[in-house]
Image (tube, coloured by chain):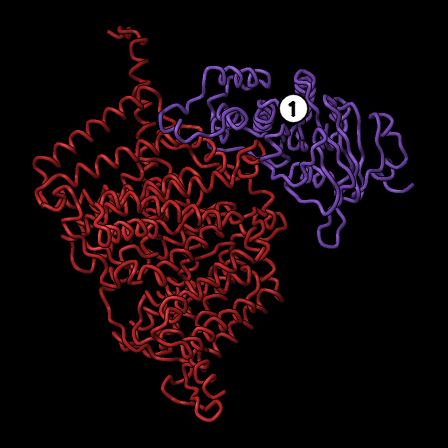
Chain colours: A red, B purple
């Protein structure tokens, strides 16, 4: 019993940390209708500012607390409501998730830009002293201030929030505003004020959670908050995003069971190294598969949701024949100039950068096909790219197979995994599907990719020149460029043909209305599996080619954070078109390269810029680049119309 | 053609449909009416496979289709329109019909798309255009549905449902949201399409004038049960129907 307590009690603070975030996720979903994956980033902002004020500016703890939690927390929540989430139609789940993702990606990258790179050590505790042992459980299991703070915070937060939601008028109005803000307005309630209050409360709670959890880690790092979020999602999912007490209890259990199992399992066993870290994600998969409430998260409850205006069509679909011909000519000229430049005068540094951009474009095409065409959101595209890269690496390493052939086999493997993922999540849609793919990505990150047999361990697989038939690695050789260009042209052309063909029309129908598509006989399960499989193959091809560029295939190169960033980047440029994917790939590497010339603190600005672009998704779901293209297309149409009208006007105006 | 026997469905403690029997013969137009909460839409959803009944059978031409998913029922010749619009906002009007036609004729072949053979054929376009002409949408064939009003969207749904020549059309409150003039036009169109194409039709509708104009026979439901059946005038004079609509005398 003593041993069990000794293993279990240290799990309590972890479980409570998960619980604080899980309760926050449920609260945000219940009061705003948004599954805010950026909640961890919000908490991190308050923790960062709190520690920065205390460490760097010697503010008193209480003053820093007021600033970080009471002012910044709700202020950030209000800003998110005012500038982002208020603009998203209640029925547009994809926009909500993408906006949350862009916060998760953008905020941690933005803080070092604003405040400089900080090493914030030892944030003070505002409740109990972390080093003091207050009492012992049993004979010798010490309970210190960290344990007490975590438990106290979780219980107080849970009680306050449950009371707020269930017993107050404001709580009732918040829940009603989620169902239908327009109907609430018809009852004479200012729904915008209610929603803004809900965001302020959620921001306050995120800030409180961030500051109170800061002392549990040695330094205040964004990574810790993102990791906490991931485990908390599992607990929130078990509670079907409805019950805060259930979410809290499950979260504590996850923490306690993880630590208890860690104590009993031999450190050299598979269970310790792979299954244990994957435990929260397995819980998430189980919840998604077996909790019925999660299958209906995206069903529109607002009877007035159909009054929201539909998204505008992409520029390519609205332009007339003449402008279309002009645009195609310009694209061909640009392609020709690009190829000539790459083969003649392009400096090796930029040639390498642009090659990498084309390989990224291939991976991004997988997002275009899956999200832009089929309307399915996957947060595991980097994982699929990694599957192909590791498969090619291992086939080359053990069987001496040519890396390009191995890459093709890897793309098939990625396609099969993606298809299986789609099969496993046939009952899920929107948010549920996104969470399932996220869980899969995390499982690969912690349990599969680090395995020696897959990646050769944390060092990864180093590519050897003998695995490739062409002189692909030579700095002044153009073989890699020609290979990746050829593959990109084939894949981009293939995706464009699919979009215009029958499969594309079926996928567009599925994206528009699953009920309507099934009602005319479209086999939705098959279409979804097909879309995932094709998308997996594209991601795999891109992953294998990226691996050639990077020369080392390491597990960290294909993690879930990259998958999140991929979605954010493609959405920024335009997720509905092939051009959007290519612009995203080239744009990413060009901005990254240009940032090399910027001061050190601005290095992280690349992701901030793309995250800002993705935030515009709320107002312009076609992407900011696509939006500008549409505007220019309209201008060109007007100019051409004026030119055509010109001959009809009399040459002589009648003026002297 | 359609035979429903002993259909029963519960939602928790609520008995939404209680042992409903219903028949629609080939080429026959049947109205399913009743006050709100009578269970009409639940019957519809059970027939089309969107809700699984707790008991009872659904047969189409003598074959039990009760365990088939919605898309399989659609391919067997059941078309449907929805009370709440289920159109594909980003697709053009013509593309809606092309998709519906392709499902029944060729299906989706990835290799055909990759070879650039995915464009609609001349025959398909002719068939699509004839239906668009019939419903009066020819001049808006290339317009994305997102740009259309409610009345035109209802016509798109109808055209999409009939282009594949279904044997049975399920029309769920097609006049919902339309004004009196639009409802009258839609009623005439529905009836003419049903007669011209010889399809069976099951119409759920609150507008009794429209029901009278469109159907051969009426089935009245109340509190999950069939309370009356017969011609429109017979049914409307039945005491059980008056009780259902107006309450007990």
Which residue is nearer to you in this view: B148 or A448?
A448
What residue appears at the point 16 percent right and 34 percent down from the top-left corner? A338
At which x and y percent is residue B108?
Answer: 46, 30
- The residue carrying mark 1 is B182
- Furthest toward the bottom, the residue is A139
Tell me the crowding category of disc 1: few under 14, some 14 to 19, or many 20 or more residues within 10 angstroms, Cα based: few
What residue appears at the point 71 percent right and 34 percent down from the top-left corner? B59
Q: Secondary structure at mark 1?
A: helix
- Furthest toward the front, the residue is A399
Q: Is residue B217 left or right of residue A125?
A: right
At which x and y percent is residue B26?
Answer: 72, 23
Toward which corner of the image does residue A655 lie, by quadrant?
top left
At which x and y percent is residue B245?
Answer: 82, 38
Q: Chain of mark 1?
A: B
Residue A352 in sight: yes
At which x and y percent is residue A424?
Answer: 49, 50
């Amino acid at each position: 019993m003593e041993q069990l307590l000794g293993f279990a009690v240290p799990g309590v603070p972890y479980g409570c940390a998960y619980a604080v975030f899980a309760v926050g996720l449920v609260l945000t979903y219940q009061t705003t209708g948004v599954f805010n994956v950026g909640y961890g980033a919000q908490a991190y902002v308050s923790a960062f500012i709190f520690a920065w004020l205390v460490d760097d500016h010697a503010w008193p703890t209480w003053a820093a607390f007021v600033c970080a939690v009471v002012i910044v927390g709700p202020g950030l929540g209000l800003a998110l409501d005012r500038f982002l989430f208020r603009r998203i139609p209640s029925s547009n789940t994809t926009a909500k998730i993408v906006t949350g993702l862009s916060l998760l990606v953008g905020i941690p990258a933005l803080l070092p830009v604003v405040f400089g790179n900080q090493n914030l050590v030892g944030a003070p505790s505002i409740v109990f002293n972390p080093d003091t042992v207050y009492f012992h459980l049993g004979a010798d299991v010490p309970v210190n201030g960290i344990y007490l703070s975590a438990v106290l915070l979780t219980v107080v937060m849970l009680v306050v929030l449950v009371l707020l939601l269930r017993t107050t008028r404001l709580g009732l109005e918040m829940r009603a505003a989620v169902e239908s803000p327009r109907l609430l307005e018809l009852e004479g309630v200012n729904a915008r004020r209610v929603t803004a209050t809900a965001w302020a409360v959620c921001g306050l709670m995120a800030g409180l959670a961030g500051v109170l959890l800061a002392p549990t880690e040695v330094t205040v790092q964004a990574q810790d908050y993102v990791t906490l979020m991931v485990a908390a999602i599992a607990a929130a999912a078990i509670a079907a995003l409805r019950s805060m007490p259930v979410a809290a209890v499950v979260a504590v259990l996850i923490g306690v069971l993880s630590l208890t199992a860690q104590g009993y399992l031999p450190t050299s066993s598979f269970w310790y190294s792979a299954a244990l870290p994957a435990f929260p994600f397995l819980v998430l998969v189980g919840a998604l598969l077996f909790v019925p409430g999660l299958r209906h998260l995206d069903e529109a409850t607002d009877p007035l949701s159909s009054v929201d205006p539909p998204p505008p069509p992409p520029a390519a679909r609205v332009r007339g024949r003449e402008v279309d011909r002009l645009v195609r000519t310009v694209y061909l000229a640009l392609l020709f100039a690009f190829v000539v430049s790459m083969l003649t005068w392009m400096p090796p540094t930029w040639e390498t950068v642009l090659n990498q951009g084309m390989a990224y474009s291939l991976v991004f095409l997988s997002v275009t096909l899956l999200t832009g065409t089929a309307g399915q959101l996957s947060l595991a595209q980097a994982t699929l790219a990694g599957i192909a890269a590791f498969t090619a690496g291992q086939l080359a390493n053990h069987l001496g197979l040519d890396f390009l052939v191995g890459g093709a086999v890897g793309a098939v493997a990625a396609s099969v995994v993606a298809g299986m993922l789609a099969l496993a999540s046939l009952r899920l849609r929107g948010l549920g599907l996104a969470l399932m793919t996220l869980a899969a990505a995390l499982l690969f990150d912690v349990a599969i990719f680090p395995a020696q047999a897959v990646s050769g361990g944390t060092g990864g697989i180093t590519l050897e020149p003998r695995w490739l038939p062409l002189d692909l690695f030579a700095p002044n050789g153009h073989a890699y460029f020609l290979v990746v260009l050829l593959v990109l042209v084939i894949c981009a052309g293939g995706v464009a043909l699919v979009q215009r063909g029958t499969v594309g029309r079926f996928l567009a129908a599925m994206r528009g209305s699953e009920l309507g598509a099934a009602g005319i006989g479209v086999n939705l399960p098959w279409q979804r599996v097909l879309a995932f499989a094709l998308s997996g193959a594209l991601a795999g091809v891109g992953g294998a080619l990226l691996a050639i560029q990077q020369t080392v295939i390491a597990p960290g190169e294909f993690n879930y954070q990259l998958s999140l960033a991929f979605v954010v980047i493609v959405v920024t440029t335009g997720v509905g078109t092939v051009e959007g994917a290519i612009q995203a790939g080239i744009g990413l590497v060009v901005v990254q390269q240009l940032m090399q010339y910027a001061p050190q603190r601005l290095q992280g600005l690349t992701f901030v810029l793309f995250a800002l672009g993705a935030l515009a998704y709320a107002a312009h779901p076609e992407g900011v680049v696509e939006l500008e293209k549409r505007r220019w297309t309209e201008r060109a149409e007007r100019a051409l119309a004026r030119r055509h009208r010109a001959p009809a006007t009399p040459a002589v105006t009648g003026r002297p | 053609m359609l035979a429903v026997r002993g259909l029963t469905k519960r939602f928790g403690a609520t008995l939404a449909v209680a042992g409903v029997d219903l028949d629609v013969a080939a080429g026959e137009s049947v109205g399913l009416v009743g006050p709100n909460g009578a269970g009409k839409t639940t019957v519809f959803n059970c027939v089309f496979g969107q809700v699984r009944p707790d008991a009872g059978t659904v047969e189409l031409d003598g074959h039990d289709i009760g365990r088939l998913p919605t898309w399989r029922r659609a391919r067997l010749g059941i078309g449907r329109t929805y009370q709440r619009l289920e159109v594909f906002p980003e697709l053009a009007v013509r593309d809606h019909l092309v998709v519906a036609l392709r499902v029944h004729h060729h299906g989706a072949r990835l290799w055909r798309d990759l070879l650039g053979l995915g464009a609609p054929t001349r025959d398909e376009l002719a068939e699509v255009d004839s239906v668009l002409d019939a419903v009066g949408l020819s001049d808006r064939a290339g317009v994305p549905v997102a740009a259309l009003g409610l009345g035109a969207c209802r016509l798109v749904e109808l055209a999409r449902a009939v282009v594949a020549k279904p044997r049975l059309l399920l029309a769920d409150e097609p006049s919902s949201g339309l004004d009196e003039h639009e409802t009258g036009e839609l009623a005439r169109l529905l009836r003419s399409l049903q007669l011209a194409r010889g399809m069976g039709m099951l119409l759920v509708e609150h507008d009794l004038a429209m029901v009278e104009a469109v159907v051969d026979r009426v089935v009245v439901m109340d509190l999950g049960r069939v309370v009356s059946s017969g011609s429109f005038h017979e049914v409307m004079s039945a005491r059980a129907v008056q009780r259902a609509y107006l309450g007990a005398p």
